[in-house]
Amino acid sequence: MGGMNDIDARFERLEPLIDRALALEGAARERFLALCGEIYPDLENDLRRALAPEDGFPALGGLAAELTRERAVDRRGQRVGAWRLGERIGQGGMGAVYLAERADGAFDKRVAIKLLRGGDPRFGEQLDRERRLLARLDHPGIARLIDGGVLDDGQPWLAMELADGEDLDFWLQGNPALRARLDVFVAICDAVESAHAAKVVHRDLKPRNVRVAGDGQVKLLDFGIARLLAPDARAGTTRQLALTPEFAAPEQLGGGAVTARTDVYALGALLHLLLTARSPHPPFDGNWASYAERILKLEPPSPSRVAESSHPLALPAARLRGDLDAIVARALRRDPAQRYDSARALAQDVRRHLAHVPVSARVPSVAYRTGRWLRRHPEAAALAALLALLVLAVLGWALVAGR
């Protein structure tokens, strides 16, 4: 029995690392594995084995075996409700995602089917209770929940609207201009505000849950899913499923209450990413206790300070100082009461910045308001400068002539 306890304790340390690694691909995953190897050298081999498609993981218990078996199973062609699974288009700690189409011929439609891992045993009942609420999320920027249920073998699943475009962090690889980044961010805020008006909090806003199409239109994924997976769970028991550490609010990491201002914090983290190509939090190392302690104690760095490290996709620090630094700082306040009170208020401040109007996140000094007015009225500013030069010239001429 003692051996099983040792195994359980070991996998308890390993599970969040596996979840995080499954959500990463390519070079990003390799960087994460290297970081884990430095911090937890005793877990590195097990972690890499868990991610190797040809390897099994029977020695570390049921959940580890489930993870590796899930990756190996090819579910293409399987019937799920009224849908038939096609190719797998995603894999993460929450489960696998498949492209699917109607199998009953009722109409022609394709969706994304999420086969969820680790759902609450009452998932089916909870889905019935929540479906009406989630159906109210009628906004062009939110991917709709279309169907869902539990298979005969207990596998929970959801059919979601298929979203075009690419994940926010991949879209950022194109190095868009500042205006394009801020326009996309405002669109994200508008979608989140619509959900909050329907009493739905996302709880896990992150780049992989934001799709950006070629025309800049956004579509947010997975609204309400964190609550569906663990509606009554205590903080910490489902945190791997319900949040992403690099974009989670301090109250989530510390086991506090989740509110609309929790999403405001995540929006601030997304804005920080859009401006600097980095999250305001350090990379997650798998140790929840120490990571939460750091986030709860340290203020996130300002975008302009992060941008000075010369990431190729970061905007120039000079363009971030002032308004944008202040907006991000207010959204990322550790105390929820000190943040913007809504996604709408955050978006309004970004719109004010774009319009060269004073933002609410800064102290409204005379110099600041004057500077904003001059930015809004460049012709008047140029005329005033010309008049000032003329006055100086006349005064200078008068002084010379009077000698």
Image (tube, helix red, strand yellow):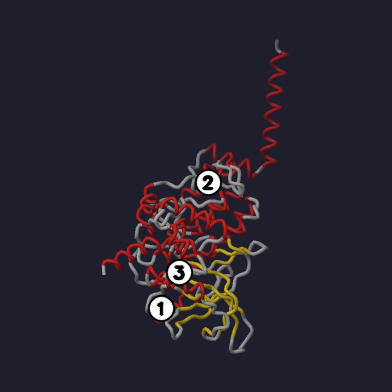
**Would you name the residue on which mark 3 appears?**
200
Q: Earlier in the sequence, mark 1 or mark 3?
A: 1
Element class at badge 2: helix
Outermost left residue: 1
Residue 126, can we see it?
Answer: yes
Q: Earlier in the sequence, mark 3 or mark 2?
A: 3
Q: How far across and how far down the image is residue 174, in percent?
A: 65, 55
Q: Earlier in the sequence, mark 1 or mark 2?
A: 1
Q: How far across and how far down the image is residue 113, in percent?
A: 54, 77
Disc 1 from disc 3: Cα separation:
18 Å
The C terminus appears in which quarter of the rendering?
top right
Residue 310: assigned label: none
**Would you name the residue on which mark 2 appears?**
303
Marks 3, 2: nearer the viewer: 2
**Would you name the residue on which mark 1 appears?**
123
Residue type pointed to by label 2: Pro
Residue type pointed to by label 1: Phe
Element class at badge 1: helix
Disc 3: CA contacts within 10 A as few (<14), some (14-19) or many (>=20): many
Nearer the observer, 138 or 65: 65
Disc 2: CA contacts within 10 A as few (<14), some (14-19) or many (>=20): many
**Looking at the image, residue 290 lies above or below residue 224:** above
**Looking at the image, residue 130 lies above or below residue 369:** below
At x 39%, y 81%, the residue is 125
Residue type pointed to by label 3: Val
At x 68%, y 24%, the residue is 392
At x 53%, y 68%, the residue is 221
**Looking at the image, residue 199 lies above or below residue 267:** below
Marks 1, 2: nearer the viewer: 1
Disc 3 from disc 2: Cα separation:
29 Å
Q: How far across and how far down the image is residue 160, in percent?
A: 54, 75
Q: How far across and how far down the image is residue 389, in percent?
A: 69, 28
